[in-house]
Amino acid sequence: MADSHPFGLHRVLEPQGVMPQAAWKLDNRMECGVNELLIDVERLNIDSASFRQIYEEVGKNEQAIAAKMKEIVAERGKHHNPVTGSGGMLIGRVREIGSMHPARQELSVGDRIATLVSLTLTPLALEEILQIDVANAQVTIRGQAILFATGLYAKMPDDIEEQLALALFDVCGAPAQTARLVQPGQTVVVLGAGGKSGLTVLAAARRSVRDGIVVAMDYGQLACERIQALGKADIVLDVSAQDAVACLASLEQAWNQRFGQAFSGADVVINCVNVPGTEMASILPCKDGGTVYFFSMATSFTAAALGAEGIGKDIQMMIGNGYCKNHADYALNLLRAEPVLQQIFRQKFAVHSH
Amino acid sequence: MADSHPFGLHRVLEPQGVMPQAAWKLDNRMECGVNELLIDVERLNIDSASFRQIYEEVGKNEQAIAAKMKEIVAERGKHHNPVTGSGGMLIGRVREIGSMHPARQELSVGDRIATLVSLTLTPLALEEILQIDVANAQVTIRGQAILFATGLYAKMPDDIEEQLALALFDVCGAPAQTARLVQPGQTVVVLGAGGKSGLTVLAAARRSVRDGIVVAMDYGQLACERIQALGKADIVLDVSAQDAVACLASLEQAWNQRFGQAFSGADVVINCVNVPGTEMASILPCKDGGTVYFFSMATSFTAAALGAEGIGKDIQMMIGNGYCKNHADYALNLLRAEPVLQQIFRQKFAVHSH
């Protein structure tokens, strides 16, 4: 592949002329182009909305999940879930570096890296699925992948084990964006706070608000126990984010109980829920002039846009960008600085089931 | 209906406990609750993505479109397109004001108003479809609708005719948000600039950037002629926003030709396109640290989120909020101050076909 485009346009098979992420099908022949990176893949970290959709479709059965994953890659040349539209990321070792690749000075063949771009635009050849960790949406495989010149990656750290780093990198945009967005003294509400991205967001929000207020919501005892264990939230609520009305009511009640006054709205609401239908639960508690940041890949654009308008809320709503500068470093440093977060991640999200 | 909730929760039939916009079906019995407004509807202004979907499904035939619209309302109690998820707005006369409605002092029975909340959450009873203006997605009907206490509306102005105001109100969030977002000296790229919202955004952007640069893109000669006639853009490009690669290439070429230097990215990109698949065309020209504002209801949340990450773009992406304070007044004043915009709107978007 001599004609190697920085965005990977040369890998797009259909439809012609679109970007690789928009393509239905990518060319997944594993020949390294002049500005491509060829990777021996060890493990895939599937986006949680995508993985949930797969096992809800085929059942929580390793063989059925493996068959479905192979079907997706065979059809599309990438692990791009056609229902959720989402992907995930991968870990592997550099096998070959194109002669024109921008990271030629930084990387060596054999380096262990994680890709920080979505699997939805990563050409992937899936030779064999070796093991599926259903609880963590992590899949050990034999296969290869291609990273384009603009494709983000991170070298695996020495002091944090592979499984842990991979779980963290998958969500590393969220805490970094939170740190950038949240200001001291603010009130922040985090939905889906007991999940992988939610916990990192909680920790980042606590650092940024300082003496402000952090409210954490999640659904179910286990998630709320993780939030309590992390110890970053002033109020923890066990309520379904799909029930917007109940969310607001329980927040108002808990706020009144805790602070002896009426809840007057959050400056920032961060949605990390991995099920659909949680837009209104994010919009309702946000005060006029505030910001709702949607990290959930299950967010519906129209539900958010029309939802805010429908109740006359003058708020900013942001589409979670999985990338901001130095996001992987920020997340690694957060994990290093927060031993409890590291412990929860290790126990819950990074357990290698043998 | 004595038990009248400000968000309209009492009108939700299924599923139970959700907000009216999220509901599959609303109670559209036309009895005015204590904090509701009952409206005699004269005209519906269907969201352009929704209207396009309808006529692409059933054909550009008035009877077929009418049948489909009746089917949607019969099934859902509101004109909420189940495919696009979008609605539109309506114009009519106040028929009854609930005894607890917040606008009891401002409104009188008989006032002509436009609703500024989406039809996706407006209980609607459609008695008869009298006329369909296919070109403008405006539908004259006999019917009634309900507005909840939090539902936004605007009184129709005396100096701007009904058709024109209705067309304007449908998009009035876009120019108001643009005015708030764009700063003097910036470079702004507007996609879908020749459409209804796009032209208002162009005019608002020009006022805000002052000596900055405004680039307008749209697809097709007619749209580009409207942009040229408005005279607010420094560069006008006729290119499909579904072809992200071609958009960037044509912008780079035109910029070089006009200014004799390389295009270094836009501070703000505003997407007003009413077809899907235009996320990457919005993301590619945005510079690191810049903002993409998606007003298009055809925007895919995941395509935007993964698209930016996929090419390592550190940008803010915002979900267009159809409401911000005084948006209707801003839009009316913009139209009053811009005679050419008013003329184009009158000719193109507000023609009453008898």
Image (cartoon, coloured by chain):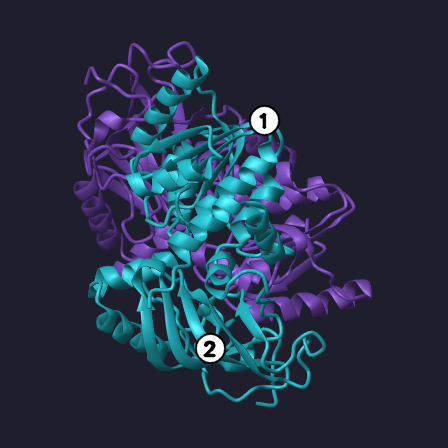
Chain colours: A cyan, B purple
> Residue A67: percent from the left, percent from the top?
26, 75
Q: Chain of mark 1?
A: A
- Looking at the image, residue A267 lies above or below residue B167: above
Mark 2 crowdedness (10 Å alpha carbons): few <14, some 14-19, many ≥20 = many
Question: In the image, residue A36 lies at what x, y percent?
Answer: 59, 81
Q: Which subunit holds the residue at mark 2?
A: A
- Which residue is tagged 2? A41
* Residue A136, horizontal then vertical, whole percent: 36, 59
**In the rendered image, which residue does mark 1 sit on?**
A211
Quadrant of the rendering where the C terminus of chain B is positioned: top left
- The type of residue carrying mark 2 is Val
The verdict on a common chain for dots 2 and 1 is yes
The answer to whether residue B56 shows anywhere in this view is: no
Local SS, label 2 = strand
* Disc number placed over residue A111 in the picture, else none: none
Side of A226 where B344 appears, left or right = right
Distance from Cα at disc 2 to Cα at disc 1: 44 Å
Please report the residue visible at 26 percent of the width from the left and 69 percent of the height from the top: A65
Residue B21 placement, left or right of A30: left
> Quarter holding the N terminus of chain B?
top left
Residue B225 higher or lower than B177, as above or below: below
Front one among B253 and A225 = A225
- Between residues B328 and B311, which one lies in front from this camera angle? B311
